[in-house]
Each structure stands twice: as structure tokens, then as C-alpha cells.
Amino acid sequence: MKRITFKVNGVTHSFAGEPEMPLLWYLRDELHLTGTKYGCGKGLCGACTVQINGEATRSCITTMKSVAGKKIVTIEGLSARGDHPLQKAWQELNVPQCGYCQSGQIMQAAALLKGKPHPTDQEIDEAMGGNICRCGTYERIRQGIKRAAE
Ligand code: FES
């Protein structure tokens, strides 16, 4: 079977298993990077969001074969000490309630801030609209993004 080589949080990995396997399974079950969550499995909720080559991406519908040569960043690799401006803002503002969706929220927001360091409310809503929070922490998420953008 053909080997697929890629980077996760700066470390090179290679994979020779089922090429159609979702990246989410690999991250959680093989690398034990369990910060990335399984929600819907259909690309609809955003709980599984990671960055691939800087783009916010749903890892539940991303196949292993599609990540060949790519750079993947998970919540564990977003910052060296959990001190990315978004992570600090999330703590300061107590953004999470149950917390389940929040890794995906932060990874989506981090991709937004990379392209737009000072997003408007509309840009935040457009970027974050696909990340569902069953606890309804949307207003705190928006405030957290604004705090991180200051
Ligand atoms: Fe991937 Fe819901 S688990 S979008």
C-alpha cells in the first residue's frame, strides 16, 4: 500500500493504511490528539476543525489520501504553551460552557485571524457560521475573537 506522508503540528508522519479513512480517526486514535472532536461526522458542525495548510478544514470528511504533503495543525499545535491570543481570550472571558465544540471554534477563529487580523462582526459571523455550539456560547465566541484581535 502506498505511503502517505504529511506533517502534524510540525512533526512528519507517514501512513500506509486505508486511504479513505477520515483524518479525524487518525488524529484521535493513532496520534491520540483528542482535542479535535467528533460531532456529526458529516462536515456540518465544525467540532472536528483543524487547519490544513492554514485553512480551517473539517477533519471528519477529509480523507487520509488527501493530506499527502500537507501541513496539519490541531488545537494541540496551535501554540507552544496554550497561549495563542485566542486561547488566552477564551480563558479570560470564560467562553466555553460544556467545551465540546471549542477546539473547533478556536481553530476556525485562528484561521480567520490569520487572514483578517481585525475582522468585522459580519466577517466573524460569516467565518464562524458553520461552527455549531449547542450551549449557545456564540456571543462569547465573538467577544473572544475581538479580544484576541485587539
Ligand atoms: Fe466534522 Fe461535525 S464532526 S463537522
Image: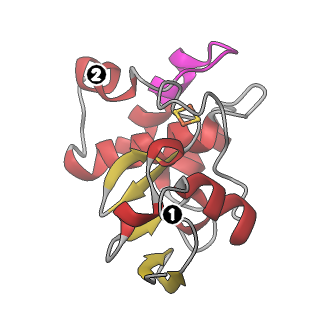
In this view, the residue in front, 23 or 10, is: 23
| Visible residue check, residue 150 | no
Q: Residue at x 54, y 80 (%)?
A: 16
For mark 1, give the secondary structure.
Answer: loop
Pointer 1 residue: 78
Location of residue 90 by image quarter: top right
Viewed as shown, does residue 97 lie left or right of 83? right
68 to the left or right of 17 = left
Q: Which residue is mark 2?
A: 126
The residues colored magenta run 132-143
The residue furthest front is: 1
Q: CA distance from mark 1 to mark 2?
A: 22 Å
Height in image: 137 above or below 24? above
Q: Is residue 138 left or right of residue 55?
A: right
Q: 47 left or right of 130?
A: right
- Amino acid beneath label 2: Glu
Q: Residue at x 28, y 21 (%)?
A: 126
Which residue is painted at 44% across and 50% down in the image? 62
Does 109 appear above or below 78?
Answer: above
